[in-house]
Image (cartoon, helix red, strand yellow):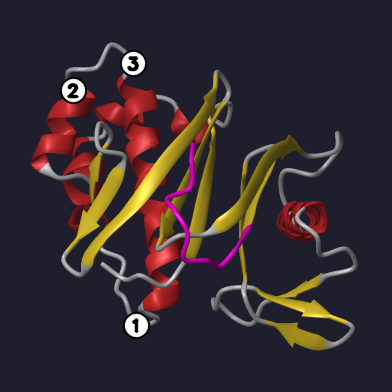
Amino acid sequence: MPTTARLGNDLVDLTTPHTAGKARDLRFLRRVFTAAEQDRIASSPDPDRVLWKLWSAKEAAYKAWSRYLPDLVFAHSRFEVDPEDGSVRLPQGLCRVHWCEQEEWIHCLAWTGFPEGLSWKVEGLPKGVPENGPEAITIPSLQARDLAARLLAGIGLPGARLHREDRRPPVVLLEGRLLEGFLVSWSHDGNRVAAAVARTGRGQEIPL
């Protein structure tokens, strides 16, 4: 398991049409989930919620691990979620996960090492955002980035800007200078955005 602090997050908006009835898609289940995870979904009184809870953990864990292993291939079924242990295991090792849920959404945090000063938030998009077209893509991304910047200000970094190239993890800039030692992750789905920030550290496991 890597000791370097890394952070990932993922958000699932359960009000979006694509989330309903997915537990009946056997081809999807076999492609994405292990046999044990499929059994967990099938035996649940709310299989769709369990499915998306497991999905969000796999996505968040990949974001955290890909910062440590940039060439990591994301094969969903190789990321095995243990909800009781609060972890996701893959061939390279283990990371911790924690879910924050409400009726309409599921948010998952994933981390390796010992991040400090962890802060996260989920918020809705402004009303009237188009469902299709360029604005449907750019507005959620910009709001998620803005939310991350506000969270950074809350942990002692006002005026920070965020920069991201291609699919690489975002970096923190202050007055044009790259700042080391800060972890940032954001996501968006449907009508909601989420972000999480922290500082790198070597202290005790973060309490959640």
Q: Mark 3 or mark 1, which is nearer the start of the sequence? A: 3
Say which residue appears at 65% left-offset and 47% top-offset: 119
Establish if 115 lies above or below 31.
Answer: below
Q: Mark 2 or mark 1, which is nearer the start of the sequence? A: 2
Q: Position of residue 58 (x, y in %)?
A: 34, 51
Pointer 1 local density, CA inside 10 Å: few below 14, some 14–19, many at least 20: few
Name the disc covering residue 46, or none.
3
- For label 2, the residue is 42
Secondary structure beneath dot 2 equals helix
Say which residue appears at 45% left-offset and 60% top-offset: 114
- For label 1, the residue is 71
Say which residue appears at 65% left-offset and 45% top-offset: 120
Give the residue type that dot 2 points to: Ala
Q: CA gap, disc 3 to disc 2?
A: 9 Å
Secondary structure beneath dot 1 equals loop
The stretch of residues the image draws in magenta is 198-208
Residue lying furthest bottom: 177
Can you see residue 79? no
Residue lying furthest left: 35
